[in-house]
Amino acid sequence: MVLASAVREYINRMLQDISGMKVLILDSHTVSIVSVVYSQSELLQKEVFLVELVDSISLSKEPMSHLKAVYFLRPISENIQYMKRQLASPRFGEYHLFFSNILNNTQLHILADSDEREVVQQVQEFYADFVAIDPFHFTLNATSNFMYMLPAVVDPPKLQHFCDRVVDGLAAIFLALKRRPVIRYSGTSDIAKRIAQEATKLMYQQESGLFDFRRTEISPLLLVIDRRDDPVTPLLNQWTYQAMVHELIGIQDNKVDLKNIGKVSKEQQEVVLSSEQDAFFKANMYENFGDIGMSIKRMVDEFQQVAKSNQNIQTIEDMAKFVDNYPEYRKMQGNVSKHVTLVTEMSKIVEERKLMLISQTEQELACNGGQGAAFEAVTNLLNNESVTDVDRLRLVMLYALRYEKDSPVQLMQLFNKLASRSPKYKPGLVQFLLKQAGVDKRTGDLYGNRDLLNIARNMARGLKGVENVYTQHQPLLFQIMESITKGRLRDVDYPFVGNHFQQARPQDVVIFIVGGTTYEESRSVAIQNATNSGIRFILGGSALVNSKRSFLKDLEEAQRVARSSTSVI
């Protein structure tokens, strides 16, 4: 709840102290920040009768002096220029300006000089510069997310822009939590090191006064890691509800677009999947696919009982009761319809793409040894006509990551097979992945075969067997959280920045993944937080990734830019 409630509190403070009819003006970033924690009906309750984007409001000249304008924008130069133009010929009666991060003095002077009509009532910084998608999970929706894969020399301004966005987001998180962290980073990653150093400079030098909260308790930990330390997690098919919806259909800012799915009613073309607003989803978001089917059947049965009782209207009292309960009935009907549609569509995709068969091999590649059997299984799937090009590519990538040093000849055979079976396959993409995230580039023990403790754990798991073959994989993040909880996160792998060290075990830990998080990782965080270990973990990332639409797309874009650049990667 911690992140969503911090953002809600900021929005409440923006809206409730300004009486009368309001227009809320957002930018392309803050519209996501607001939409995941505040519904349309809640905005109406706060007398917000219009929500507009700052770039489109610039095009209109119609005066609306009866409305009070509440702006909530990121403090970027583009938005300051929009404000400058809009204040030059004001359309609204009052202007209340809120920015999601730290304004610099130059920006403040521009705003002050532009307000010749003295319509601006207040200018404030409300540190909600992140999208709080789940109670302990946030994203920054960073543009050009692929930049983290490229060396600084390829496009220095674009990489600086990416780093600035990440540092801004991290600053906002800790200002919202009213804490200043000790910072560590993934030792083999240049981008993680750069972001960690820039965040330290901001929090301990440039804005040290702002971050000095005079708190006596132990400082929280910010750990900046690189998506390439664990390239396996975003390549796997998922079998728990939330992660599976994102992998197979796609979730953007807690919304799922169902327009392209068969015959869905108009109100079901875009549905909200939020643990804050949907009790069924909250209870089942981390459950596996088999159990979800049973839970939905129970929900449908309950709804049918309610529907049956509503058909039995015989008296005026019955009718009045039905009218009173109708909004709740409609909401229940919409919820049942939404989850039935999602599960039906996913079942269809699983069947069409033969994902149960593929996923079994994926999990073996991610979790268990046995290179000979793995080679045979991947070869058979590459020859299977039902397997799609993207699934073939993912299988070869998972094999290559696991056995890059063990079997160069067999790996070459798989590359050739992939090229012949998948005409759309871009040559060299698997090799590019190995250059980016191969064993020599990674921090941490991804396959649990370097560290004695991990080897023992894998053996124990092999002896006991696993409860569910499709969900046996655990992301590297799980090991990292375990190491932090036990005080065993090695300084040599995850160095501290500067001379700010952890005096004792932290109570709050923010783990930020440059390159993006997955819903499988956010599930790991939720499970870890439920163990009450005394540490509260928060997960954040530059983006929210799945295999096809994010991770592979970023990889292809980075490869394209790298090839067109004169620099050699």
Image: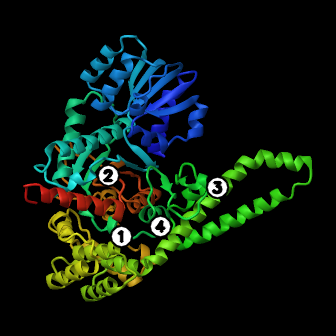
The vertical placement of 165 against 338, above or below, is above
Which of the marked residues, 2 or 1, is nearer the chain's N terminus?
1
Mark 3 → mark 2, Cα distance in angstroms: 36 Å
Q: Nearer the viewer, mark 2 or mark 4?
A: 4
Which of the marked residues, 2 or 4, is nearer the chain's N terminus?
4
* Secondary structure beneath label 1: loop
| Residue beneath the point at 44% across and 20% down | 95
Q: Nearer the viewer, residue 272 or 402?
A: 272
Instruction: Name which residue type carries label 1.
Output: Leu
* Secondary structure beneath label 4: loop
Which residue is tagged 1?
236
Q: Nearer the viewer, mark 3 or mark 2?
A: 3
Q: Horizontal and vertical percent for residue 309?
A: 82, 59
The vertical placement of 257 against 82, above or below, is below
Q: Are marks 4 and 1 in contact (CB under 8 Å)?
A: no
Q: Horizontal and vertical percent for residue 134?
A: 46, 51
Instruction: Name which residue type carries label 2.
Output: Ile
Horizontal side of 343 relative to 91 (left or right) equals right
Which residue is tagged 3?
334
